[in-house]
């Protein structure tokens, strides 16, 4: 009985550990190994032709202007998109939380969450029409108020921001639900006591609400950062990295290098660099959270 009790936790944890091992850890190790080889279409199935190339793959992609552009684009998506989507998600959650359990607010919760579970291909068809420079709704609205039409996805100067609009709309729903659940967990007695002491809404926000939901805020920040570093679907479906590589992300560069050009070694090297970006950002977030807890 003692042995059975000792083994029970490991039996329940084992499936998750095996999935993590075979779907994440082992592929990462294999990718790291491939990044030091010249693996390409010619070497597939002919492993005797595979050559160790050292750091040449890393040198090649780091000197590649398209890869450099993908890094700057990804950092732009992260630095601009993440704060916007977190701020919008929190604002929506805060407003919906203030509405209580009224049916109209339950309806709005479903409306704001629905983009997160909608298929990206279906979404792209709608948004391609919205962004269309000649028949799109957005330009019709601009012309109606007397402004010049925008080329949206057709111009390198506006394509990135157009994708950001779509991404913020699509990603705010899940974060909104997390924030909403956190807000509902804050004891109402704290607000009642602070109101009796004369605290206003702004004071309650910074002295009661935010300190009590900091774990959820930290979780949303980390997961959102990781997700936006892997920015792929919007680029793949809407622009394919264009026009003139103005929207290409690091993940789309990996996809295009590996599956379009067949340079799997260089694609693996780009994946490793992306992994290091995500690792560093996550470690910094964990350090900041640990420092804040102290």
Image (cartoon, rainbow, N blue to C red):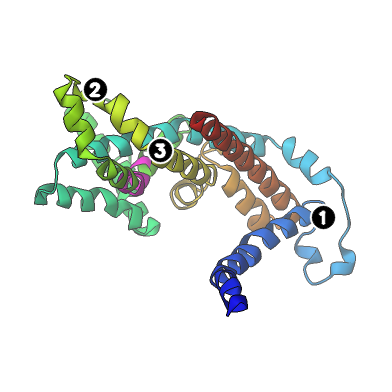
Farthest residue, direction top: 198
Q: Which residue is the extreme one toward the front?
A: 2
- Magenta-tinted stretch: 168-177
Mark 3 near mark 1, Cβ–Cβ under 8 Å?
no
- Residue drawn at point x = 71 percent, y = 52 percent: 268
Q: Mark 1 sits on what residue?
A: 38
Q: Nearer the viewer, residue 273 or 254?
A: 273
Residue 265 image offset from top left, x and y in percent: 76, 54
Going from N to C along the chain, the mark reached first, 3 or 1, is 1
Residue 244 image-quadrant placement: top right
Callout 2: SS: helix
Residue at the spot of label 2: 202
Spatial separation of the CA atoms under disc 3 and disc 1: 43 Å
In front here: 126 or 105?
105
Q: Residue at x 77, y 59 (%)?
A: 40
Q: Majority secondary structure of the magenta segment? A: helix
Q: Considering the numbered disc 1 on the image, is that residue within a helix, a strand or a loop?
A: loop
Give the quadrant of the N terminus.
Answer: bottom right
* Residue 200 position in % (x across, y down): 19, 21
Assess disc 3: are there few (<14), some (14-19) or many (≥20) residues with their C-alpha within 10 Å of its C-alpha.
some
The residue tagged 3 is 217
User: What residue appears at the point 14 percent right and 41 percent down from the top-left corner?
Assistant: 99
- Residue 5: in magenta span: no
Residue drawn at the location 88% of the way across and 58% of the way down? 51
Q: Quadrant location of residue 212?
A: top left
Closer to the chain start, of discs 1 and 2, is 1
Determine contact: label 3, label 2, CB under 8 Å: no
Q: CA distance from mark 3 to mark 2?
A: 18 Å
Q: Nearer the viewer, mark 3 or mark 1?
A: 3
- Residue 234 locus on image (x, y percent): 45, 48
């Amino acid at each position: 009985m003692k042995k059975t009790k000792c083994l029970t936790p490991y039996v329940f944890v084992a499936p998750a550990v095996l999935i993590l091992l075979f779907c994440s850890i082992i592929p990462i190790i294999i990718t790291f190994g491939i990044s030091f080889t010249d693996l390409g279409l010619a070497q597939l199935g002919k492993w005797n032709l595979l050559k160790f190339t050292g750091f040449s793959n890393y040198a090649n992609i780091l000197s590649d202007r398209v890869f450099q552009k993908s890094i700057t684009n990804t950092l732009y998506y992260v630095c601009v998109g993440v704060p916007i989507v977190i701020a919008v998600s929190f604002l929506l959650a805060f407003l919906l939380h203030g509405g209580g359990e009224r049916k109209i607010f339950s309806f709005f919760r479903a409306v704001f969450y629905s983009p997160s579970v909608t298929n990206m291909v279906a979404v792209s068809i709608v948004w391609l029409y919205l962004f269309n420079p000649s028949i799109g709704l957005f330009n019709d609205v601009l012309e109606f108020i007397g402004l010049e039409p925008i080329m949206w996805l057709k111009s390198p100067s506006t394509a990135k921001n157009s994708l950001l609009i779509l991404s913020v709309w699509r990603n705010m729903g899940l974060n909104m639900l997390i924030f909403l659940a956190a807000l509902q967990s804050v004891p109402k007695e704290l607000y009642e006591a602070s109101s009796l002491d004369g605290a206003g809404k702004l004071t309650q926000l910074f002295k009661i609400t935010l300190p009590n939901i900091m774990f959820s805020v930290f979780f949303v920040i980390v997961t959102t950062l990781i997700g936006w570093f892997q920015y792929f679907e919007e680029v793949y479906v809407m622009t394919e990295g264009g026009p003139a590589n103005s929207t290409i992300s690091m993940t789309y560069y990996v996809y295009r290098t590996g599956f379009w050009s067949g340079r799997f070694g260089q694609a693996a090297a780009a994946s490793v660099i992306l992994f290091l970006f995500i690792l560093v950002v996550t470690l910094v977030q964990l350090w900041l959270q640990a420092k804040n807890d102290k």
